[in-house]
Image: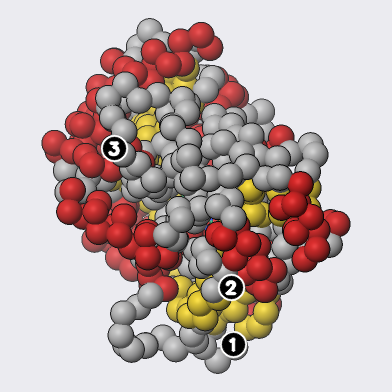
Amino acid sequence: MIYSAKRFFSLAKKPRNPNHRSIQKQDLEYFQSILSESEIITSDLSKYNVDWMSKYHGDSKLVLLPNSTQKISQILSYCNTNMLPVVPQSGNTGLVGGSVPHYDEIILSLQRLNKIIDYDTNNDIVTTESGVILENLNQYLSQFNTEAPYDLGAKGSCFVGGNIATHAGGKYLVKHGPLRGYVLGLEVVLANGQIMNLLNKSRKDNTGIDLKQIFIGSEGSLGIITKANLLCVKKAIEKNLLFIKTSSFQNILQIHNIAKSEIGKNLAAIEWMDSYAYKAVMENIKTAKDVFDSQNKIDQSYYVLIEINTNFNKDLVVEQFYNSLSQVEGLVSECVLAQNDHQFDELWKIRELVGSACGHIGKVFKYDISLNTAQMDDITKDLRQKCIDLGFTVGYGHIGDGNLHINISCLDKTKEQQLENQIEPYIFEWLSKKGGSISAEHGLGLMKADYLHLQKKPEVIDCMKNIKKIFDPNLILNPYKILPGI
Ligand code: FAD
Ligand code: MLT
Ligand code: ZN
């Protein structure tokens, strides 16, 4: 069945799969026979049934928290035989409604699968269970002077498995490239309970189809990621952060170009925000410091954060870059250079808290898109104008990766649907015409499954559906998400 993209309200329910069952007494008895009491939750499930944005709500009656791959295998084998749908859930920080049930699917939480297994000091490869929180993994890795090859604002809550399942991006993609190049191996449990051992510690492995890649970014639709071998990176010796205020978006593009040529491979991250985003943080996050004394004014200012990692000649690289910027008249209005680790973190928080800040204003309609960097401010302004009566619109994101985030917070609780209808499918159709991606890094989840046709040709979607049916013929894994009509 194909659902219409027009006038589809993402908070509305899709038709329920009639082949799926709800849990009954005998199902619970089976789970009780293979799991301990602490691995089963049947009451007070509210935090598992709602996503980070409080936008998507499910009605699951059962959360299972198995502590081993074997138990996950038994659970899935039973669910598959008995047509019980399952939603894998890690840190539940996903932003597209993928990690919560749509109806009463069983929630399979990975939070007890939280052991780091070993570290290969010669090759900097960590082997870990998938339920380890990213920040905890980094704490463990610091003894080897290494870290994960990515970082995101949700690091204190998101799990490594969730990051792999969404193919998370984050701020260091400029420095390290996409996560999939660092996932050397995986262990995955398929819908029928079969354990696929794709674990591997070789950097190079050209033995046929690289099956692990299909699970990276598959958002829980093809299998449950239970273990991973992750190639880690050496921690930077010197981390420098410049926070620049400038007077136009065009200037940001120019600063980006100068950064690429002057800083080269020492450029670790480059991120931007408009003055609406800056104001949202200053007004709504009590701990945020207004380093530019903006006094919450909205103006034509734009902000760009540039992290430079160096192993030697720190002052030279930073100084040379700053001198190049200064030579262009009017390029830098103000600039702050982090003086210590505390300031470094404080400045980064201003950027990382944009998403949370928007949530304080109202329900947030979030767009995570890839497009030509030159168009980022135009599309943000265009949407701001379109939603001026109902929404507060901010533009920000990962300019170094061509990834724009637009958040539109609803100013009137009674008009959320009206606001969404003003934005969608307009924004997705705009992207479809201009080229780019409707999902740069957050994934499709429930939110964008029905817009996939704007991005991918029918034969491509058919191929994806056929792959889904090979791995999950009864469609029990994360139903209603990622692919249209599934
Ligand atoms: P969840 O939200 O629990 O799950 C995400 C999806 O993966 C769901 O579809 C779920 O079913 C599936 N899944 C989870 N675990 C597994 C598993 N073990 N096996 C199979 N499927 C699984 N994202 C970015 O890409 N870049 C950012 O910079 C970024 N910044 C963020 C900042 C904040 C403050 C927040 C709240 C979110 C941010 N995100 C970002 C989005 C989110 O954090 C990422 O998508 C993250 O990778 C999700 O991890 P999680 O553990 O919370 O997974
Ligand atoms: C970010 O870059 O901050 C994220 O992807 C999350 C968000 O947009 O809220
Ligand atoms: Zn992002």
Whether residue 168 is visible to the viewer of this picture, yes or no, is no
Kind of residue indicated by mark 2: Lys
Task: Tell me the residue that label 2 is attached to.
Answer: 227
Sequence-wise, the earlier of marks 1 and 2 is 1
Residue 319 pos. (x, y %): 38, 58
Q: In the figure, is residue 50 to the left or right of 441?
A: right
Secondary structure of residue under mark 1: strand
Residue at 26% x, 33% y: name it. 428
Residue 90 pos. (x, y %): 61, 54
Viewer-side residue, 360 vs 166: 166
Classify the position of the N terminus by image quarter: top left
Task: Tell me the residue that label 3 is attached to.
Answer: 2
Secondary structure of residue under mark 2: strand
Question: Quick check: 284 above or below 253?
Answer: above
> Marks 1/3: CA distance?
48 Å
Count of numbered labels shown in the rendering? 3
Q: Nearer the viewer, mark 1 or mark 3?
A: 3
Task: Tell me the residue that label 1 is attached to.
Answer: 120
Question: Quick check: 275 above or below 452?
Answer: above
Sequence-wise, the earlier of marks 1 and 3 is 3
